[in-house]
Image (tube, rainbow, N blue to C red):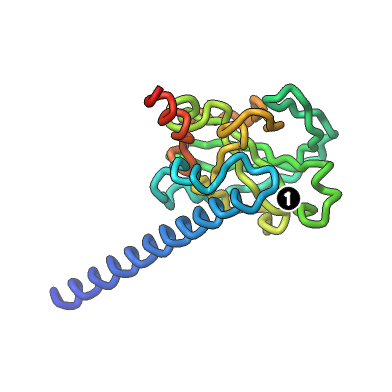
Amino acid sequence: MKVVLSTLFTVLVAAFGSQAQTFTEETNQYRNHYKEEFLHSENSPLKAADLSYLQFYEPDSTYRVVAHFEKAKGKSFEMPTYSGMNKTYVKYGVLKFKVNGRRQKLTVYRSLSLQQLAKYKDYLFVPFKDKTNGTDTYGGGRYLDLKTTDLKNGTCVLDFNKAYNPYCAYSTGYNCPIPPLNNHLAVAVTAGEKNFTKHQHEASIK
């Protein structure tokens, strides 16, 4: 009996380890693709030499949560950006979920201008702030991207490991939306992209 239990325990540990490894590999693969995109985007604020200054939390599957989605019919409004300009969005819905055992919610937005482009017709935008901003992460908040096809049967997988910085975290001159107050989370989301460290490096050698 002990042999059977021992074997079962070994199998379970191996299976769990395999799942964790797969999640880590998938997250790292996503991040490598994310970095590569900077080299192909016409208005990118970063060059190849800057990519080493991109920092991330270790992949953590506890920050990949299943959220309940509630569709909304909001009127278009102007979302302020850090450059002083506004961008037109509409409230698309609300995501309700738990992080670290605490109930949270985030509003999902849709850009009216991007909606007109075939490439971004399914694009949804989730700007947010949390308790890590200004310390471990960029003070201006971070973003998550979704697609309308990610919303299935009233649920959506929300992966904060894919949270990324706006271009304003790297350079000036960009129109980065400011996360609305209703998207300020009362928890620390220790997942996704951290502070861009090039600025700290440059300051240390002056």
Image point (66%, 47%), residue name: 69
Q: Which percent across, then down, holds residue 101?
A: 44, 39
Counting every numbered tag in the picture gives 1
Image point (56%, 45%), residue name: 47
Specify the quadrant that holds the C terminus.
Answer: top left
Specify the quadrant that holds the N terminus.
Answer: bottom left
Q: Is residue 30 left or right of residue 83?
A: left
Q: Nearer the viewer, residue 92 or 146?
A: 146
Q: Which percent across, then down, holds residue 80?
A: 73, 25
| Quarter residue 177 falls in | top right
- Element type at marker 1? strand
Q: Is residue 10 left or right of residue 174?
A: left
Looking at the image, the residue that sits furthest to the left is 2
Q: Nearer the viewer, residue 190 or 11?
A: 190
Image point (58%, 27%), residue name: 140
Kindly identify the amino acid type of the residue bearing the numbered disc 1.
Answer: Tyr
